[in-house]
């Protein structure tokens, strides 16, 4: 799809757009800069992004940074929509799952097939990611990582002080938060934003009904699963969790909730493994100061999301830098350097886990096992479980319930109606 302009220059005239015209032929003068829109603005995220920026700058590419704060990317997607509507999209945009497909359907993306073919991306990126990185057979995005969402982050010093082990069952989990609460700590650090509520909720759903229930209710949106008593139990468990939040949770950013665990104010946070990047960035050690473990009752299931850089159609002079960005993202050494800082695991399947901490090694092994066992599913909260319209409908009910605007019974009923209307 990308237009390749052939150089046949006799006499040259450089226009303001940086394109050289000659005898009706055109030559592209590369503008070696690439604008990247992203939402990696927390300490850990910015540190990981720095690895990518430095790599590109070493290749002579100028990085034009367009950060839009807001975990999960909701705000970044709003900015993108207005940029694209104005006909001025950035060259590359961080994006999740079905959002990529939605943009591809609008016909505004560029493909990076040439570099993908030259570097054999088909062979090293798992199918579950290719589903989003490709559209109608063409590569339109470069996947940088795989995160997963069904994690709990614990302050090990508090856990020790309470004389507790890492909880493995839901009851042990609740009991640990009760003990923290009794000892004057906050049981669960949380930021009350719709995407964070949904991140907790989807893990709770797996803890109630297992991977089969997640597949039926979220991925396939089967009416029987949506109407089942298990769905009511999911909302009831969310009500249980709410008891362990501090009164100021509403609107709090996710990294500030991580900071509560880091600073020893709170015992747990339920958050995707980007939280690990915050712990590392604060100088804490995995297994010593903090630990990440699967949400009790979800062991063996991996709810994943992958950050991908989606390439937009840009002027010819910007295409070379765009290709170099795609290639830099897919570089195996970069994927290790980046993901060890970010808290995620590489998108490529052919890199070693040697540089990763014990949590990262486990995450890589679990991802491979879940893929093998059919217990790997896209995270709904992070755009990989359902199309955006359905996801937004789910979020509305989840967040209204978690904020006390409806009972668990009302939420379970509303959830079915909302999903049906959005389909
Ligand atoms: C992204 C992560 C990011 C997190 C919080 C998720 O949707 O996949 O890369 O760190 O949001 O901003």
Image: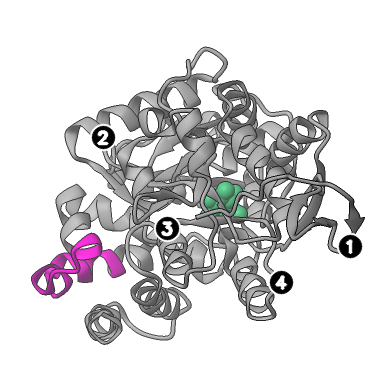
- The color scheme shown is one colour
Contact between marks 1 and 4 (CB within 8 A): the answer is no
Chain-order first, disc 3 or disc 4: 4
Residue 176 x/y as whole percent = 42, 43
Identify the element where label 3 is drawn: helix
Contact between marks 3 and 2 (CB within 8 A): the answer is no
Residue with the mark numbered 4: 88
Residue 191 x/y as whole percent = 58, 63
Label 3, label 2: how many angstroms apart (C-alpha)?
22 Å
Q: Which disc, if any, is residue 200?
A: 3
The residue sitting at 64% across, 66% down in the picture is: 76
Residue with the mark numbered 1: 15
Label 3, label 1: how many angstroms apart (C-alpha)?
53 Å
Magenta stretch, residue numbers: 217-235
Chain-order first, disc 3 or disc 1: 1
Q: Is residue 408 magenta?
A: no
Vertical comparison of 160 with 195: above or below: above
Chain-order first, disc 4 or disc 2: 4
Residue with the mark numbered 2: 371
Chain-order first, disc 1 or disc 4: 1
For disc 1, the neighbor class at 10 Å (few under 14, some 14 to 19, many from 20) is few
Could one spot residue 328 in this view of the protein?
A: yes
Quadrant for residue 89, please give it.
Answer: bottom right
């Amino acid at each position: 799809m990308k237009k390749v302009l052939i150089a046949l220059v006799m006499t040259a005239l450089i226009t303001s757009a940086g394109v050289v015209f000659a005898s009706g032929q055109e030559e592209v003068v590369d503008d070696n800069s690439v604008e990247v829109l992203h939402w990696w603005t927390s300490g850990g995220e910015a540190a990981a992004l720095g690895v990518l920026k430095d790599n590109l700058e070493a290749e002579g590419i100028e990085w034009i940074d367009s950060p839009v704060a807001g975990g999960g990317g909701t705000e970044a997607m709003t900015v993108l929509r207005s940029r694209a509507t104005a006909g001025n999209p950035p060259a590359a945009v961080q994006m999740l799952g079905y959002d990529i497909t939605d943009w591809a359907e609008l016909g505004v993306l560029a493909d990076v097939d040439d570099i993908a073919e030259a570097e054999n991306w088909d062979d090293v990126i798992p199918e579950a990611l290719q589903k989003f990185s490709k559209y109608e057979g063409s590569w339109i995005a470069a996947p940088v990582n795989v995160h997963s969402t069904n994690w709990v982050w614990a302050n090990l010093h508090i856990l020790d002080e309470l004389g507790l082990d890492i909880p493995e069952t839901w009851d042990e989990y609740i009991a640990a938060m009760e003990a923290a609460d009794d000892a004057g700590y906050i049981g669960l650090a949380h930021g009350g934003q719709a995407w964070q509520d949904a991140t907790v909720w989807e893990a709770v759903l797996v803890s109630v009904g297992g991977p089969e229930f997640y597949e039926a209710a979220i991925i396939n949106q089967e009416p029987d699963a949506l109407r089942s008593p298990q769905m009511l139990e999911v909302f009831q468990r969310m009500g249980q969790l709410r008891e362990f939040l501090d009164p100021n949770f509403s609107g709090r950013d996710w990294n500030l909730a991580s900071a509560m665990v880091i600073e020893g104010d709170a015992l747990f946070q339920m958050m995707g493994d980007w939280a690990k990047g915050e712990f590392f960035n604060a100088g804490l050690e995995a297994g010593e100061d903090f630990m990440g473990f699967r949400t009790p009752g979800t062991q063996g299931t991996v709810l994943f999301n992958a950050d991908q850089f989606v390439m937009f159609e840009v002027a010819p002079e910007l295409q070379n830098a765009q290709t170099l960005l795609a290639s830099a993202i897919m570089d195996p050494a970069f994927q290790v350097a980046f993901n060890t800082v970010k808290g995620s695991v590489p998108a490529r399947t052919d890199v070693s886990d040697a540089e990763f901490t014990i949590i990262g090694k486990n995450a890589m092994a679990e991802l491979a096992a879940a893929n093998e066992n059919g217990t790997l599913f896209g995270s709904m909260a992070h755009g990989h479980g359902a199309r955006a319209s359905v996801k937004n409908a789910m979020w509305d009910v989840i967040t209204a319930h978690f904020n006390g605007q409806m009972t668990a019974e009302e939420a379970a009923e509303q959830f079915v109606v909302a999903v049906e209307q959005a389909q």
